[in-house]
Amino acid sequence: MANWIINNGLTAFILVVWMGINIFLFVRFYLLYDLNDEYYYTRHLLGAALPWARAPAAVLNFNCLLILLPVCRNLLSLLRGSFVCCGRTMRKQLDKNLSFHKLVAYMIALMTAVHLIAHLLNVEWYNNSRRGVYDKLSTALSDLEDTDNTTYLNPIRSLNVDAQQSPTYLVFTTIAGITGVIITLALILIITSSMEFIRRSYFEVFWYTHHLFIIFFIGLVFHGAGRIVRSQQATIPPHNFTYCKDRSDQWGQIAECPIPQFAGGFPQTWMYVIGPMILYICERLLRFIRYMQTVSYRKIVMRPSKVLELQLVKNGFNMEVGQYVFLNCPAISQLEWHPFTMTSAPEEDFFSVHIRSAGDWTDKLISIMQQLPEGAQGPKMGVDGPFGTASEDVFDYEVSMLVGAGIGVTPFASILKSIWYKFKDSNPKLRTRKIYFYWLCRETQAFEWFADLLQVLEREMEERGMADFLTYKLFLTGWDQSHAHHAWVHFDENTDVVTGLKQKTQYGRPAWDKEFEQVRKENPTSVVGTFLCGPAALAKVLEKKCAKYSDVDPRKTKFYFNKENF
């Protein structure tokens, strides 16, 4: 348990606080509408559906305030920079922005469902009360009106519409009803298109439908203006419902029971969302300014396994290791932006990305680049970033474990290049004294573009007498008997037959218990940062291993897990 707290304690605390606020808001507003005297007559018409409609609305307001903040990338980068003086645990929370974004979205979906079902019941009960289906008091309350038609209780004002059609008529002729339908449809499309399968296989569908959030927020701002839920107002003389509820036929005829007056509450949703909306608009303006800045191509290289390397130059561009950028190619789509981790080092006078064929957008970009004449500039490219990730903290640890799967090796290319430059320049600020690097790939060709960098590092470490600084292990996870036989035949050679490196490629997947045990044994008093850029399944495994092999004693080895999130 103590090991788990080391890696997840602050995250769990933040989630408990968030959930506590949600529960508090739900209970507070449920009791408000269930017990307050001003809603007595409203409750008489609607029953328990009134608090069940209003309590989720309060939770929705709070979560709609939060939903945009985790996707304000520039805001997060600013916050990450401001936390440099604070602990790494605090900065790690910013790397879980998308997980929190999804969690808030799930809460919005749940509360929307409860809110919607309760209001559907409300509309039906409003209609029945207007038609005189219920008791004498319900009918009297529904018949209330004045010359301006503003102090009524029941929003169904006309009996000229067929009884079966009245609920539908109310929904599509009121501000609350129309905006509610628009909000719900937008939310359904956003959530369904965000499923992992659609996001991975049909990114364009995810991208375009996600921008329905603009319609969602516009509808949200105007939704409360309908003021469909109404409360009793103070009158002179006062209308005492405990005395007058059984004397509805005498309302307005005796001094003790003046005709009750009702009004809708002041809309509050806009006050919750206006701040995040302004922040997000500023975010998009900054992205547009960056998009308009000129980006030139330094080099375009096609690597093995259909991997495209772009070396780009942009004035005023400054990066740190492991950061990522968003790329937009108007020749393919004016609106689509895709994230790519930079593979260059901060010490270089350009920044580079390696792009693997993984969908329509990347396929089209690779096709365009392959058709270019040699030495030609590529199509216009918009660049937004750079943005910080967990890998920025790699040099804050004495010992680092870097785990990359497939193209997930890209942030570690940046890190390893930067290490090479730091050694070359004898940088005294390099705190890290040991790096363990693991790369898992399905096919042999995927090793080729990265092997050159590892060969340079191998040679550099040997020349400086620091061969133990970098320990790297390459694992080929997709192999057959011919691969194994070929490797066995050439086993006695000094270099690996797959990569040309001195370190031999291993077949299969790492035995993580063995690897963590070895790292702990070799570094008995160190804080070890474990960094992953790879699939979620591997992340779960490594996170458990970090907890398992961390020692509660602060003087002994502790593992901190960090994962790249886009």
Image (cartoon, grey):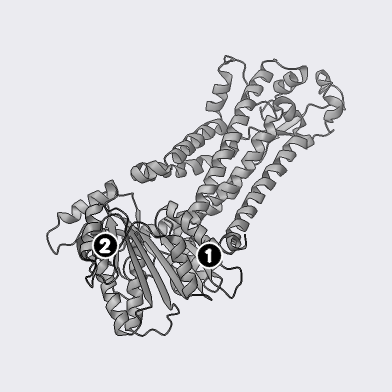
Give neighbour class at mark 1: few <14, some 14-19, many 20+ (Cα, 10 Å): some
Q: Position of residue 206 (x, y in %)?
A: 39, 43
Give the camera-side residue of 23 and 235. Answer: 23
Q: CA distance from mark 1 to mark 2?
A: 30 Å
At horizontal 12% and vertical 59% (from top left) the residue drawn is 373
Q: Quick one: label 2, few (<14), some, or many (20+) residues within 10 Å?
A: many
Q: Which-is-in-front pick, marks 1 and 2?
A: 1
Q: Can the viewer see residue 233 in this picture?
A: no
Name which quarter of the figure residue 157 lies in.
Answer: top right
Specify the quadrant that holds the N terminus.
bottom right
Give the residue drawn at x 33%, y 50%.
336
- Going from N to C along the chain, the mark reached first, 1 or 2, is 2
Residue 224 at what x, y percent from top left?
Answer: 60, 39
Q: Nearer the viewer, residue 30 or 11?
A: 11
Q: Secondary structure at mark 2?
A: helix
Q: Is residue 340 above or below residue 105?
A: below
* Image position of 67 with respect to 56: above or below: below
Rendering coords of residue 416 (x, y %) = 34, 72
Residue 319 is left or right of residue 76, and the answer is left
Q: Residue at x 64, y 47 (%)?
A: 22
Q: Residue tagged by mark 1?
A: 549
**Which numbered circle lies on residue 48?**
none
> Is 88 in front, or is 545?
545
Q: Which residue is identified by label 2? A: 447
